[in-house]
Image (tube, rainbow, N blue to C red):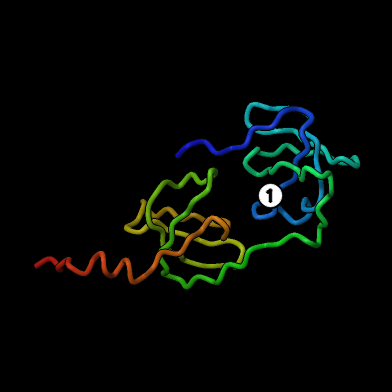
Amino acid sequence: MPDTTPSFAVGDKVICNPEETPAKYHGLVFTVEKILPVNIAIRPLGGGRGLRIHPSLLLPAPADGTTPAANAVTVPFHPMLSPGAAVTVASPRWKGGNGLYIVLNDNVDTVRLALLGGDEHRVWTKVPRSWITAVDQQAILDAVAGLRRPA
C-alpha cells in the first residue's frame, strides 16, 4: 500500500480529521510547530494546549481562513453490522493486514473483529467504524458455490 500520509511544514495551518479524532478537537485550527520523527507537534491558533499527533489524522485547514464550527461537523452514517458479517478494513494506520474479517461486535463507533479462518485466537478490538467496508454476502456465496465438502 502506498504511503498516503500528508506532509506538512512548520507554520502550516491544519485541522483534525473529524472521522478519526475525538469531538473535542473538531472546529479548531492548529499551527504546525515542529516535525517529529513520527508525529507532528501542533498548537491551537487561539492558544492553549498543544498536541503531538500522527499526520494521517490531520487535514489542511480551509484556505479561506475560516474556522469550521464545532457543531457543524458532518459525521457519515454507518449502519450497524450484524455479528458474523464479513468485512474488509482500510486505513493507513491499519496494522492487521489484508483479508476478510468477521464482525464479533459492533459498538456503533467501533467494531470488534476476527480474521476469517483464524489467526491464533487474535481479536482486534476498537477498530474505528469508518475504516470498515461490508462485503456483499451474495458475492461470497457465489464465489464458493462450486466448492464441495470433503468426503
Category of crowding for the residue at label 1, using alpha-carbon neighbours closer than 10 angstroms: few (below 14), some (14–19), many (at least 20): some
Q: Is residue 115 above or below residue 29?
A: below
Q: In which quadrant will I find the C terminus? A: bottom left
Q: How many marks?
A: 1
Q: Residue at x 79, y 30 (%)?
A: 11
Residue, far right? 46
- Secondary-structure class at tag 1: loop
Q: Give the residue number, with chain letter if any, for mark 1.
A: 17
Q: Residue at x 49, y 51 (%)?
A: 90
Q: Residue at x 78, y 61 (%)?
A: 72
Q: Amino acid at mark 1?
A: Asn
Q: Is residue 112 above or below residue 26?
A: below
- x then y, percent, for residue 46: 91, 42
**77 left or right of 87?**
right
Q: Judge by depth and name the residue closer to the eye, 146 or 97.
A: 146
- x then y, percent, for residue 40: 70, 33
Residue, far front? 64
Q: Judge by depth and name the residue closer to the eye, 141 or 109.
A: 141
- x then y, percent, for residue 79: 55, 71
Q: In which quadrant will I find the N terminus? A: top left
**103 left or right of 16?**
left
Q: Residue at x 45, y 47 (%)?
A: 96
Q: Is residue 105 above or below residue 68?
A: below
**88 left or right of 117?**
right
Q: Judge by depth and name the residue closer to the eye, 109 or 78.
A: 78
Q: Is residue 100 above or below residue 58?
A: below
